[in-house]
């Protein structure tokens, strides 16, 4: 039940608004609204401009955990030579399309990313005897999800599928493919990323994780004195994780310089060091490094 005084107040308010056109809030925005300010009504953010398309191109430098220690005797003295690749270098690209979000309804986002790096190294095992290592990583992901409002920023949450190819090999200067590990990994995963505005900078951090399976192919030469070749192929359960943190510096209204750190890990794979002398058990492959590139909205 409403008091008469309240009814009178409501009637007075209705009368005061008669003859004034009702203000209609926009229901959606497009990429052409990217220059517009965030819509605020009574100090409440109703919606935030979102570019329709975004693209990223980055150079990548990462350290790969692929070393193996080889022991040998040097005139009665035991020595250890470590064979590993140098820093792995390559590139990363990302393309995404998103729809606007409102405080009461999330937007949608579709994204595609690809990371490819490779590296090699050479180590003297005995005087005049060199071992080399060459490795490569290719991982690509397609995801679909939702964008939402955060305090001074926005979030992206997606579900997706990832394919990863991991391969590396140990070679001797006089013989190739002493130990070779090749892996094809397919996982389904979820990711979460946040973006926060701070003056001319945008701070970003994200994490993804998934489960699936790997097809492992190991081959090489036995180190028991027989030097017989071996080859084995099998499937195993696998998991994949990726984490990143970035700082974006605004160059123009739609262009940002992007500097970040990135890590990637896959469990349930076999590298060359897991294949030395025989097809060993699966293990974990890890990469950690830096990225530098350009982010562009259009």
Image: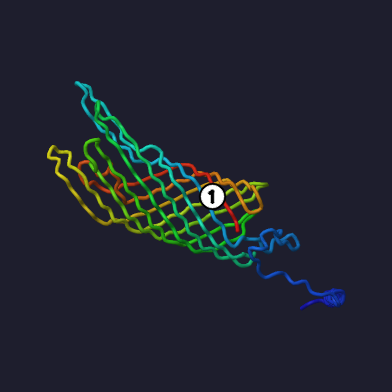
Left or right: 14 in relation to 85? right
Q: Residue at x 23, y 54 (%)?
A: 233
Residue 30 falls in which quadrant of the image? bottom right
Q: Quadrant of residue 108?
A: bottom right
Residue 69 in the image: above or below residue 103: above
Q: Residue at x 38, y 37 (%)?
A: 86
Q: Which residue is mark 1?
A: 205
- Residue at left offset 85%, top offset 77%: 18
Q: Answer with left or right where residue 253 lies relative to residue 291.
A: right
Quadrant of the image for the N terminus?
A: bottom right
Horizontal and vertical percent for residue 101?
Answer: 62, 64
Residue 36 percent location from the top left of the image: 71, 60
Return the residue found at the far left: 226
- Residue 38: x %, y % from top left: 70, 59
Residue shown at 34% from the left, 41% from the top: 66
Residue nearer the viewer, 247 or 206: 247
Q: Is residue 87 above or below residue 141?
A: above
SS for tag 1?
A: strand
Mark 1: give few (<14), some (14-19) or many (20+) Cα within 10 Å.
some
Q: Nearer the viewer, residue 213 or 138?
A: 138
2 left or right, relative to 176? right
């Amino acid at each position: 039940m409403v008091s008469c005084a309240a009814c009178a107040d409501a009637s007075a308010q209705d009368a005061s608004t008669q003859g004034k056109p009702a203000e209609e809030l926009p229901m959606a925005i497009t990429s052409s609204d990217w220059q517009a300010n965030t819509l605020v009504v009574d100090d409440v953010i109703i919606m935030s401009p979102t570019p329709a398309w975004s693209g990223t191109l980055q150079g990548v430098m990462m350290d790969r955990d692929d070393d193996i220690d080889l022991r040998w005797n040097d005139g009665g003295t035991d020595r250890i030579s470590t064979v590993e690749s140098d820093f792995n270098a390559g590139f990363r690209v990302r393309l995404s399309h998103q729809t606007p979000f409102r405080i009461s309804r999330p937007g949608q986002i579709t994204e595609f990313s690809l990371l490819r790096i490779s590296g090699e190294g050479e180590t003297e095992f005995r005087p005049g005897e060199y071992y080399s290592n060459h490795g490569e990583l290719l991982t690509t992901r397609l995801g679909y999800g939702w964008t939402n409002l955060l305090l001074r920023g926005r979030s992206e949450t997606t579900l997706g599928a990832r394919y990863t190819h991991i391969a590396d090999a140990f070679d001797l200067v006089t013989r190739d493919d002493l130990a070779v590990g090749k892996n094809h990994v397919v996982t389904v995963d979820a990711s979460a990323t946040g973006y926060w505005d701070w003056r001319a900078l945008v701070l970003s951090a994200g994490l993804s994780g998934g489960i699936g399976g790997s097809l492992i192919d190991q081959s090489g030469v036995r180190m028991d004195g027989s030097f017989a070749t071996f080859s084995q192929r099998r499937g195993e359960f696998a998991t994949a994780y990726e984490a990143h943190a970035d700082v974006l510096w605004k160059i123009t209204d739609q262009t940002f310089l992007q500097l970040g750190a990135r890590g990637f890990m896959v469990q349930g794979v076999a590298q060359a060091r897991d294949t030395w002398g025989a097809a060993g058990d699966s293990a974990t492959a890890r990469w950690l490094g830096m990225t530098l590139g350009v982010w562009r909205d259009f």
